Image (spheres, rainbow, N blue to C red):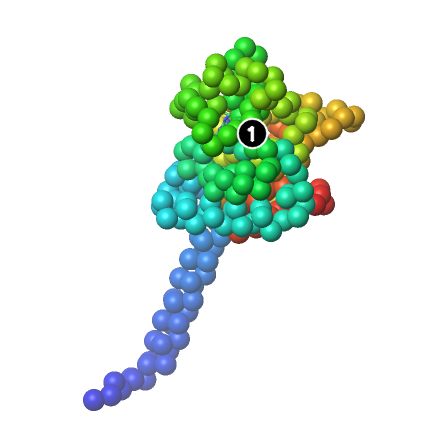
Amino acid sequence: MGIRLGPFGSGLTSRRHIRGSSLLLVLLIFTILFPLKLMPANKRELRAYLRAQRTALSAQQQRQHAQALAQGFLQAPSLLKHRHIAFYLPQDGEIDPRPLMQVLLKRRHCVYLPVLHPVSHHQLWFVRYHTKMPLIANRFGILEPQLTAYGHRASNRLPAWALGIIALPLVGFDSQGGRLGMGGGFYDRSLAFTRRAQGNKPLLLGLAHECQKLDDLPVEPWDIPLQGVLTEAHLYWHNGKG
Ligand SMILES: Nc1nc2c(c(=O)[nH]1)N(C=O)[C@@H](CNc1ccc(C(=O)N[C@@H](CCC(=O)O)C(=O)O)cc1)CN2
Ligand SMILES: Nc1ncnc2c1ncn2[C@@H]1O[C@H](COP(=O)(O)OP(=O)(O)OP(=O)(O)O)[C@@H](O)[C@H]1O
């Protein structure tokens, strides 16, 4: 049996319609405003929020992103033309550059890893990496080449200015070259020389998951901007470089 509408039937329907569409409008406003409202305003909270985003990725997503990152790099002639490239060993959900490093090593590129400087506070050394070299956990628990076994010899290191690319780990990035790191200021200090007008400068390329992208990061006076960011989905260039 069909439902018969009373004299107010159509009125009820349209009121329900209005209620339905105003609910939709509220939902729309919330989906636009809520993330903005929730987005933390200070760097400490932003870090916590973005670190939670990347650690929430599954092991399978991490593997897929690492493979896609390698593909993206290997398809970019402007990146591949560089011979001396620094990466990092991933921690805390960072995108994993190791599959890419293995391919580049086979193709006779020279791969380097950051090592906390033994004396100079908050500076990095870039030590040449070989597949079978001894690694040791630094004070943050991140694996790095063991200096006593290997890296103390200057011939096994390269100054940052002599590298073609430095691929930087990051917690967050924006579309203007802004980078949010782990908060130690290691890369900013080690790359402060790039502010000088003269001299060789490596290409500064952030490596990240898409979920680490923000519209606008706060910029501090000491922040060294990235020229590009490679994710599992895109190669972004800032300042028209590339
Ligand atoms: N993979 C990787 N290697 C890297 C960096 C990085 O961000 N990722 N770094 C980039 O600069 C440097 C190390 N900087 C780091 C700074 C802080 C913390 C960290 O975990 N901090 C803790 C609290 C400090 C502590 O436990 O003493 C935290 O924030 O929870 C880790 C690395 C060099 N090597
Ligand atoms: N060139 C510099 N000279 C002196 N201090 C610096 C320099 N760069 C950064 N710092 C200091 O390092 C601290 C951390 O900086 P910031 O929060 O920007 O680190 P980060 O970029 O997130 O860390 P990282 O590069 O280690 O991933 C700041 O308090 C700042 O004072």
Q: Position of residue 85 (x, y in %)?
A: 60, 34
| Quadrant housing residue 78 | top right
Residue 211 visible in the current orientation: no
Q: Nearer the viewer, residue 39 or 145?
A: 145
Residue at the (60%, 25%) spot, across then down? 188
* Residue 38 horizontal/vertical position (percent): 44, 42
Q: Give the residue pinned by disc 1.
A: 112
- Residue under the image location 45 percent in, 34 percent down: 90
Q: Residue furthest top?
A: 119
Which image quarter holds the C terminus? top right
Q: Is residue 22 left or right of residue 180?
A: left
Q: Secondary structure at mark 1?
A: strand
Q: Quadrant of residue 219?
A: top right
Figure quadrant of the N terminus: bottom left
The amino acid on which the numbered mark 1 sits, given as a three-letter code, is Tyr
Q: Which residue sits at x=52%, y=46%?
A: 70
Question: Residue farthest to the bottom?
Answer: 1
40 displayed left or right of 125: left
Taking the image as shown, residue 128 lies to the left or right of residue 176, namely left
Disc 1: CA contacts within 10 A as few (<14), some (14-19) or many (>=20): many
Residue at (45%, 37%) from the top-left corner?
94
How many numbered marks are there? 1
Which residue is more in the foreground, 14 or 71? 71
Percent position of residue 236, x then y: 62, 47
